[in-house]
Amino acid sequence: MAEQLSLDEVRHVAKLARLRLTNQELEQYRSQLSAVLEHIAKLNELDVAGVEPLAHPRDVTNRLDEDVVGESMPVEQLLAIAPAVEGQFLAVPKVLGEETGP
């Protein structure tokens, strides 16, 4: 069995990910991250000499269709099916501005 991660190592990973974790969460993630690393260690033991790299399990290629200009949806119809509308505009959640994170 691989060595269990220390709490300091988990704190460091959490800091890099900009996560604030409670002591209980640190202990939980310590166990989970250790299990993931143990699994990776098992995978590293496999002999893959002669195995070709694989991007996809099936032989597929991208299908690229021609760009064809079509009819646009009328604005009134679009606004009628939109989840949120403000005036004649689609309302979307604010993603820039006040920072609430660490």
Image (cartoon, rainbow, N blue to C red):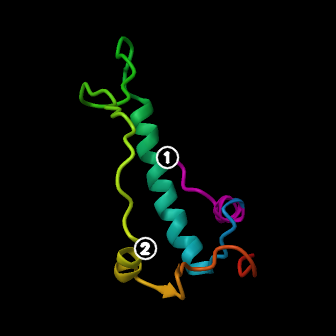
Question: Split into 4 quadrants, where in the image is the C terminus?
Answer: bottom right
Q: Earlier in the sequence, mark 2 or mark 1?
A: 1
Q: Quadrant of residue 55?
A: top left
Query: Which amino acid, by three-letter code, is at mark 1?
Result: Ala
Q: Nearer the viewer, mark 2 or mark 1?
A: 2
Q: Quadrant of residue 12?
A: bottom right
Residue 55: which numbered mark, if any? none
Residue ID for mark 2: 75
User: Is residue 31 visible in this depiction of the protein?
Assistant: yes
Q: Position of residue 87 (x, y in %)?
A: 54, 88
Which residue is the site of mark 1? 2
Q: Which residues are magenta?
A: 1-15
* Residue toward you, 63 or 23: 63
Q: Amino acid at mark 2?
A: Val
Q: Is residue 58 above or below residue 101?
A: above
> What residue occupies the far bottom of the structure in this picture?
87
**Residue at image point 50% right, 71% down:** 28
Q: Residues within 10 Å of mark 1 (few under 14, many from 20)?
A: few
- Left or right of residue 35, residue 65 in this image: left
Of residue 36 and residue 7, the one placed in the foreground of this image is 36
Q: Position of residue 59 (x, y in %)?
A: 25, 24
